Image: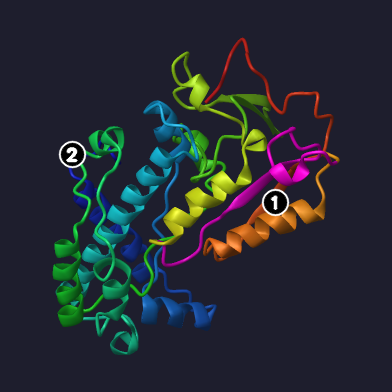
Amino acid sequence: MIHSDNFEKSIETSIRALTNVSIMTNNDSVPTIQRGNKDYHSVGLGAMGLHTALATNKIHYGSEEALEFTDAYFRALRFYALKASNKIAREKNETFYEFEKSEYANGSYIKRKYIDVEDFSFKSDKVAEIFNKVNVPTKEDWEELNSDIIEYGLFNAYLLTVAPTGSISYINEASSSIHPIINLIENRQEANVGSIYYPAPNLNNETIRYYKSAYDTDMREVIDIYATAQYHIDQSMSLTLFMRSVIPEGLYEWKNGKSQNMTTRDLNRLRNYAWTKGIKSIYYIRTHTGDDGIELGVNECESCQI
């Protein structure tokens, strides 16, 4: 997406495709779902491959540059998704149910989130260069879009979500969702095939230092990434926390001088941190409870299958 020659068109195409699915879905066997589709036209445009993009561009996951990258991407995603929904509302002369009662109708939502705040600007020259093909919206862009939404409305009540993308990310040769990779080479057991090895996308001698297992990553870095995206996401995000049964020494300062065994108190600290960052929910907590001396995956393989 960041290499797309027309980021806006790519997002609009995605929103239109998802909207068509919503319109064509006529679940008369479940009337409540049928009515929900008809009234709200809600869709969930997601994302995958964040860690891949960061590693490919030699940015460490959880760093200030990574947070700026995440902010710029989801800010642009939000803007062009809203713009596409506004176009559809104009074409169909239809808005989602009770649009007039929403904060979109009086402009207060966009005003509060994007206009009455400090304008976004790149602080990192590297990140700015990465986004040289993407027109990240300015405050003036938001003001213009806000006026159009007040006048013509939105067709979709909700537009964005971030799914786990655990399986489809392998097909697309991308890291799952927006969390870190699990392993440099992940070993998956498939019932009909046996072991299949999935190397981290674009793994090579240059990118390997920017790939670190989620189980060896401070989960506050993951939460910070998700919180940055959450600001622009109007629905949910599948935030997964990864914890070893024996926490790597020095990873969390509150474990210094204490047992490195993971406890529910450690999880509660991370949950509370997520709450203070505005995270709406935690999807899964994946724990590695085997022998921590054994690698979760492998570091080499004779033949790797994607």
Does the magenta portion include 255?
A: yes
Residue depicted at x 36% and y 28%: 57
Question: In terms of secondary structure, where does tag 1 sit?
Answer: strand
Which residues fall within the magenta stretch? Answer: 233-258
Which residue sits furthest front?
A: 257
Residue 122 locus on image (x, y percent) = 26, 45
| Circle on res. 225 | none
Residue 285 locus on image (x, y percent) = 70, 51
Amino acid residing under circle 1? Ile
Q: Few, some or many C-alpha atoms within 10 Å of disc 2 (few <14, some 14-19, many ≥20)?
A: few
Instruction: Assign the magenta stretch its main secondary structure.
Output: loop
Does the magenta portion include 261?
A: no
Residue depicted at x 17% and y 79%: 152
Residue 300 locus on image (x, y percent) = 63, 14
* Residue receiving disc 1: 285
Please, is residue 65 above or below residue 199 in the view? below
Of 68 and 169, which appears nearest the observer?
Answer: 68
Quadrant in which residue 78 is drawn? bottom left
Of 38 and 289, which appears nearest the observer?
Answer: 289
Residue 14 visible in rendering: no
* Residue receiving disc 2: 5
Residue depicted at x 32% and y 80%: 96
Residue depicted at x 56% and y 35%: 181
Of 191 and 130, which appears nearest the observer?
Answer: 130
Quadrant in which residue 251 is drawn? top right
